[in-house]
Image (spheres, rainbow, N blue to C red):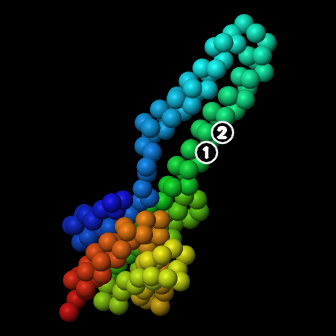
Amino acid sequence: MPYRWTPHAPDTKVVLTLWPFRSLPRRGFAAMILMAFTLGTIPLYGLLGSVVLWGILPFILITVGALWYGLERSYQDGDILEELRLEDDTLILTHRPARGHTQSWDCNIYWARAEMHVIGGPVPHYITLAGNGRTVEIGSFLSEDERKVLYGELHDFLKNEAPA
Protein backbone atom coordinates (compact mmCIF):
# COMPACT_ATOMS: atom_id res chain seq x y z
CA MET A 1 0.00 0.00 0.00
CA PRO A 2 1.30 3.46 -0.81
CA TYR A 3 0.57 4.73 2.68
CA ARG A 4 1.98 4.05 6.11
CA TRP A 5 0.73 4.51 9.67
CA THR A 6 3.52 5.55 12.04
CA PRO A 7 2.41 5.35 15.65
CA HIS A 8 4.05 7.58 18.24
CA ALA A 9 6.23 9.69 15.95
CA PRO A 10 8.18 12.46 17.73
CA ASP A 11 5.87 15.22 19.07
CA THR A 12 2.79 13.47 17.66
CA LYS A 13 0.65 10.50 18.58
CA VAL A 14 0.05 9.07 15.10
CA VAL A 15 1.10 9.96 11.56
CA LEU A 16 -0.47 8.69 8.35
CA THR A 17 1.69 9.33 5.28
CA LEU A 18 0.25 8.83 1.78
CA TRP A 19 2.01 8.94 -1.59
CA PRO A 20 1.17 7.83 -5.16
CA PHE A 21 2.15 4.33 -6.24
CA ARG A 22 5.24 4.09 -8.47
CA SER A 23 5.01 1.13 -10.84
CA LEU A 24 8.34 2.04 -12.47
CA PRO A 25 11.19 2.68 -10.01
CA ARG A 26 14.15 4.88 -10.97
CA ARG A 27 16.29 1.84 -11.86
CA GLY A 28 13.54 0.67 -14.21
CA PHE A 29 13.40 4.18 -15.67
CA ALA A 30 17.12 4.02 -16.54
CA ALA A 31 16.79 0.49 -17.91
CA MET A 32 13.84 1.57 -20.10
CA ILE A 33 15.78 4.47 -21.62
CA LEU A 34 18.82 2.25 -22.25
CA MET A 35 16.64 -0.44 -23.82
CA ALA A 36 14.85 2.08 -26.06
CA PHE A 37 18.17 3.50 -27.23
CA THR A 38 19.70 0.04 -27.84
CA LEU A 39 16.68 -1.33 -29.68
CA GLY A 40 16.38 1.89 -31.67
CA THR A 41 19.96 1.70 -32.90
CA ILE A 42 19.92 -1.99 -33.92
CA PRO A 43 18.44 -1.23 -37.37
CA LEU A 44 21.18 1.35 -37.92
CA TYR A 45 24.03 -1.18 -37.80
CA GLY A 46 23.31 -2.19 -41.39
CA LEU A 47 23.46 1.45 -42.41
CA LEU A 48 26.92 2.18 -40.98
CA GLY A 49 28.99 4.07 -43.51
CA SER A 50 26.02 5.34 -45.52
CA VAL A 51 24.38 8.76 -45.63
CA VAL A 52 21.00 7.26 -44.75
CA LEU A 53 22.27 6.61 -41.20
CA TRP A 54 22.42 10.37 -40.54
CA GLY A 55 18.87 10.78 -41.86
CA ILE A 56 17.40 8.18 -39.50
CA LEU A 57 19.55 8.72 -36.37
CA PRO A 58 17.94 12.06 -35.36
CA PHE A 59 14.48 10.47 -35.34
CA ILE A 60 15.66 7.67 -33.05
CA LEU A 61 17.31 10.19 -30.71
CA ILE A 62 14.15 12.33 -30.70
CA THR A 63 12.10 9.24 -29.82
CA VAL A 64 14.39 8.33 -26.91
CA GLY A 65 14.39 11.96 -25.74
CA ALA A 66 10.59 12.12 -25.87
CA LEU A 67 10.36 8.89 -23.87
CA TRP A 68 12.76 10.29 -21.26
CA TYR A 69 10.81 13.57 -21.07
CA GLY A 70 7.46 11.79 -20.72
CA LEU A 71 8.65 9.47 -17.96
CA GLU A 72 10.40 12.30 -16.10
CA ARG A 73 7.27 14.46 -16.33
CA SER A 74 5.23 11.56 -14.95
CA TYR A 75 7.59 11.35 -11.96
CA GLN A 76 7.26 15.09 -11.32
CA ASP A 77 3.45 15.01 -11.60
CA GLY A 78 3.33 12.16 -9.10
CA ASP A 79 5.46 13.94 -6.51
CA ILE A 80 2.53 14.31 -4.11
CA LEU A 81 2.66 13.75 -0.37
CA GLU A 82 -0.17 13.85 2.16
CA GLU A 83 0.38 13.63 5.89
CA LEU A 84 -2.27 13.26 8.58
CA ARG A 85 -0.97 13.96 12.09
CA LEU A 86 -2.60 13.80 15.49
CA GLU A 87 -1.09 16.37 17.86
CA ASP A 88 -2.76 16.43 21.26
CA ASP A 89 -6.46 16.59 20.27
CA THR A 90 -5.87 18.30 16.92
CA LEU A 91 -5.96 16.39 13.65
CA ILE A 92 -3.79 18.08 10.99
CA LEU A 93 -3.85 17.16 7.29
CA THR A 94 -1.05 18.58 5.12
CA HIS A 95 -1.18 18.16 1.34
CA ARG A 96 1.95 18.91 -0.70
CA PRO A 97 1.02 18.92 -4.40
CA ALA A 98 3.46 18.36 -7.25
CA ARG A 99 3.22 22.04 -8.14
CA GLY A 100 1.86 24.85 -6.04
CA HIS A 101 1.65 25.70 -2.40
CA THR A 102 1.27 23.29 0.50
CA GLN A 103 -2.27 23.17 1.84
CA SER A 104 -3.19 22.44 5.44
CA TRP A 105 -6.37 21.60 7.35
CA ASP A 106 -6.85 21.09 11.07
CA CYS A 107 -9.71 20.08 13.28
CA ASN A 108 -10.39 18.84 16.78
CA ILE A 109 -10.39 15.04 16.49
CA TYR A 110 -13.68 14.88 18.38
CA TRP A 111 -15.44 16.66 15.50
CA ALA A 112 -13.55 15.03 12.62
CA ARG A 113 -15.26 12.36 10.58
CA ALA A 114 -14.28 10.36 7.52
CA GLU A 115 -16.79 10.05 4.69
CA MET A 116 -16.75 7.85 1.62
CA HIS A 117 -18.58 9.00 -1.49
CA VAL A 118 -19.13 5.82 -3.52
CA ILE A 119 -20.42 7.86 -6.47
CA GLY A 120 -20.49 11.56 -7.16
CA GLY A 121 -16.85 12.33 -6.44
CA PRO A 122 -14.03 12.87 -8.94
CA VAL A 123 -13.09 9.20 -8.46
CA PRO A 124 -15.14 6.20 -7.24
CA HIS A 125 -15.06 5.65 -3.47
CA TYR A 126 -13.81 9.19 -2.86
CA ILE A 127 -12.68 9.81 0.75
CA THR A 128 -13.10 13.12 2.54
CA LEU A 129 -12.46 14.35 6.06
CA ALA A 130 -15.01 16.76 7.49
CA GLY A 131 -14.75 18.99 10.50
CA ASN A 132 -14.19 22.58 11.59
CA GLY A 133 -16.67 23.73 8.94
CA ARG A 134 -14.63 22.34 6.02
CA THR A 135 -14.48 19.17 4.00
CA VAL A 136 -11.15 18.10 2.48
CA GLU A 137 -10.16 15.17 0.30
CA ILE A 138 -7.60 12.60 1.29
CA GLY A 139 -5.92 9.93 -0.82
CA SER A 140 -7.62 10.76 -4.13
CA PHE A 141 -4.51 9.51 -5.99
CA LEU A 142 -4.83 6.02 -4.49
CA SER A 143 -6.49 3.18 -6.39
CA GLU A 144 -10.12 2.33 -5.70
CA ASP A 145 -9.26 -0.77 -3.64
CA GLU A 146 -6.65 1.17 -1.64
CA ARG A 147 -9.19 3.92 -0.88
CA LYS A 148 -11.67 1.31 0.40
CA VAL A 149 -9.08 -0.14 2.80
CA LEU A 150 -7.87 3.33 3.83
CA TYR A 151 -11.42 4.44 4.61
CA GLY A 152 -11.93 1.51 6.97
CA GLU A 153 -8.63 2.17 8.74
CA LEU A 154 -9.28 5.93 8.92
CA HIS A 155 -12.82 5.42 10.25
CA ASP A 156 -11.54 3.04 12.94
CA PHE A 157 -8.70 5.43 13.82
CA LEU A 158 -11.06 8.39 14.29
CA LYS A 159 -13.48 6.29 16.32
CA ASN A 160 -10.76 4.94 18.63
CA GLU A 161 -8.68 8.13 19.05
CA ALA A 162 -11.51 10.59 19.68
CA PRO A 163 -12.01 11.37 23.36
CA ALA A 164 -15.11 9.76 24.86
User: Which residue is rendered at x = 42% and y = 56% of the image?
Assistant: 21
Secondary structure under the numbered disc 1 in the rendered image: helix
Relative placement, left or right, of 164 versus 81 is: left
**Residue at image point 48% right, 86% down:** 134
Is residue 126 visible to the viewer in this orientation of the structure?
yes
What amino acid is labelled 2 in the image?
Answer: Ala
Q: Which residue is mark 1?
A: 70
- Reading the image, the residue beneath label 2 is 66
Query: Answer yes or no: do the residues labelled 1 and 2 have beta carbons within 8 Å?
Result: yes
Residue type, numbered disc 1? Gly
Which quadrant is the C terminus positioned in? Answer: bottom left
Q: CA distance from mark 1 to mark 2?
A: 6 Å
Q: Residue at x 56, y 55 (%)?
A: 77
Secondary-structure class at tag 2: helix
**Image position, residue 87 (x, y; %):** 30, 75
Residue name at image x 47 percent, y 32 percent: 31
Q: Quadrant of residue 10?
A: bottom left
Q: Is residue 13 left or right of residue 32?
A: left
The image position of residue 56, as x and y in percent, is 74, 23
Q: Is residue 71 above or below residue 54?
A: below
Residue 140 is labelled as: none
Location of residue 61 with respect to 134 vertically, above or below:
above
Q: How many marks?
A: 2
Vertical arrangement, residue 140 with respect to residue 66, above or below: below
Measured as percent of width and height from the top left, residue 26 is found at 45, 40
The local crowd at label 2, few if under 14, some if 14 to 19, many if 20 or more residues have their Cα within 10 Å, is few
Give percent across and percent down for residue 43.
64, 20
Say whether residue 120 is left or right of residue 59: left
Asked if one can make out residue 105 in the rendered structure from this viewpoint, the answer is no
Residue 128's image quarter?
bottom left
Badge 1 local density, few (<14 within 10 Å), some, or many (20+)?
Answer: few
